[in-house]
C-alpha cells in the first residue's frame, strides 16, 4: 500500500491507513507538540508539502486537516510565540533596543550562528549590514548573499566607530574586540556577544554609550519564552484532542477510543 512519507529534521514517518492513533500523532506533529523546539513553525510547511504528494484521497484529507489544526493551534495559543533560538532571540533583543531599521550593523564571524543571525536581521528589514571575519573570503561570501559588504578584520575598529549594533559570534579562543578599540562614541552602540568563550571584552561597558549583552543574557530570555510555551502547550493539546474527535468521528474511526 502506498503512503505518505513525512521527513523533518528529527523524524522520518510513513503514514498509510488513518487510525485514531496516527491521526492524533500527526495533529500533534503539525501543532508543534512533538518538535524538538516546542511550537516551531517549520513543521507546518513540512506537513503541507508531504500531504501534497498523497495519492490516496483519505491521506490527502488527513494531511490537509493536520495543517488546519496546526494553524488553529498557533492562532489560538501562544505555543509559537517568543524567540527560542540564540540567533532569533539576539536579533529580537536588538530590535527592541534600536529605534529605527536604518542602522549600521557589523556582524563579526561567518559561521552557522552568524548566518542565522543574518537571516533574522533580513526578516526584520535591517539593511545596512557589514560582515567581518578573519578569513576575508568567508566574510565576502556571507555578505554577498544578502547584498551586504565584507570588511577586512584589520578595518574592524574603524567600521565600529559609527556602527549602531555589533553582533559577534566567532570560534576564536581569545577576545577579538577590546575596550580601546571602541574609541570615543558619537552615538550609542549596542554589542551582542554570542560567542563561547567570549569575543568581547566586558570592559567595553566602561565606554559611555556602549551597551553589552552576552549569551547568558540571551539565554535568560529564551528560558522564559520556553516556559511560556510549555503553559501554552496545555491549551494546544486540548485543541488537538477536540480536532481528533471531530475528524475521527466523521470517519467513524473507533469513536470510543478518541474520548
Image (tube, rainbow, N blue to C red):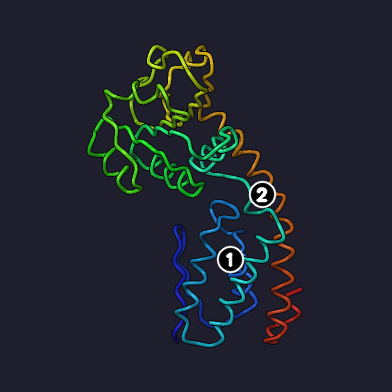
* Towards the viewer: 149 or 10: 149
Q: Position of residue 235 (x, y in %)?
A: 74, 58
* Towards the viewer: 227 or 76: 76
* Residue 173 visible in the displayed image: no
Q: Residue at x 58, y 65 (%)?
A: 30
- Is 96 placed above or below 199 here? below
Residue density around tag 2, few if under 14, some if 14–19, many if 20 or more, within 10 Å: many
* Towards the viewer: 48 or 5: 48
* Towards the viewer: 186 or 23: 186
Q: Secondary structure at mark 2?
A: helix
Q: In the rendered image, which residue does mark 2 sit on?
A: 229
Image quadrant assignment for residue 256: bottom right
Position of 242 with respect to 32 (left or right) is right
Q: Quadrant of the C terminus?
A: bottom right
Q: In the rendered image, which residue does mark 1 sit on?
A: 30
Residue density around tag 1, few if under 14, some if 14–19, many if 20 or more, within 10 Å: many
Q: Residue at x 50, y 24 (%)?
A: 189
Q: Residue at x 56, y 40 (%)?
A: 92
- Is 251 placed above or below 153 here? below
Position of 99 with respect to 137 (left or right) is right
Q: Secondary structure at mark 1?
A: helix
Q: Position of residue 174 (x, y in %)?
A: 35, 20
Q: Position of residue 177 (x, y in %)?
A: 38, 20
Decide which of tag 2 and tag 1 comes sooner along the chain: 1
Q: Position of residue 82 (x, y in %)?
A: 62, 46
- Is 196 placed above or below 124 here? above
- Is 11 placed above or below 93 here? below
* Residue 27 visible in the displayed image: yes
Position of 83 with respect to 107 (left or right) is right
Image quadrant assignment for residue 183: top left
Number of the label disc, if any, that sits on residue 67: none
CA distance separating discs 2 and 1:
15 Å
Amino acid at each position: 500500500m502506498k503512503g505518505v512519507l513525512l521527513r523533518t529534521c528529527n523524524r522520518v514517518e510513513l503514514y498509510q491507513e488513518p487510525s485514531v492513533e496516527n491521526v492524533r500523532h500527526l495533529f500533534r506533529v503539525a501543532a508543534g507538540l512533538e518538535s524538538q523546539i516546542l511550537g516551531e513553525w517549520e513543521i507546518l510547511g513540512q506537513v503541507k508539502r508531504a500531504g501534497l504528494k498523497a495519492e490516496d484521497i483519505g491521506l490527502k484529507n488527513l494531511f490537509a486537516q493536520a495543517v488546519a489544526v496546526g494553524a488553529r493551534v498557533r492562532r489560538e495559543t501562544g505555543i509559537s510565540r517568543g524567540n527560542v533560538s540564540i540567533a532569533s532571540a539576539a536579533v529580537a533583543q536588538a530590535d527592541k533596543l534600536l529605534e529605527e531599521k536604518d542602522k549600521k550593523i557589523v556582524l563579526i564571524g561567518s559561521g552557522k550562528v552568524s548566518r542565522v543571525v543574518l537571516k533574522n536581521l533580513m526578516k526584520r528589514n535591517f539593511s545596512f549590514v557589514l560582515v567581518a571575519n578573519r578569513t576575508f573570503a568567508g566574510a565576502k561570501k556571507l555578505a554577498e548573499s544578502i547584498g551586504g559588504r565584507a570588511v577586512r578584520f584589520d578595518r574592524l575598529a574603524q567600521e565600529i566607530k559609527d556602527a549602531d549594533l555589533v553582533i559577534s559570534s566567532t570560534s576564536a579562543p581569545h577576545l577579538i574586540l577590546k575596550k580601546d578599540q571602541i574609541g570615543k562614541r558619537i552615538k550609542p552602540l549596542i554589542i551582542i556577544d554570542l560567542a563561547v568563550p567570549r569575543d568581547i571584552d566586558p570592559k567595553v561597558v566602561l565606554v559611555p554609550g556602549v551597551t553589552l549583552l552576552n549569551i547568558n543574557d540571551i539565554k535568560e530570555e529564551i528560558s522564559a519564552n520556553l516556559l511560556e510555551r510549555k503553559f501554552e502547550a496545555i491549551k494546544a493539546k486540548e485543541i488537538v484532542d477536540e480536532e481528533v474527535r471531530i475528524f475521527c468521528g466523521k470517519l467513524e474511526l473507533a469513536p470510543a477510543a478518541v474520548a
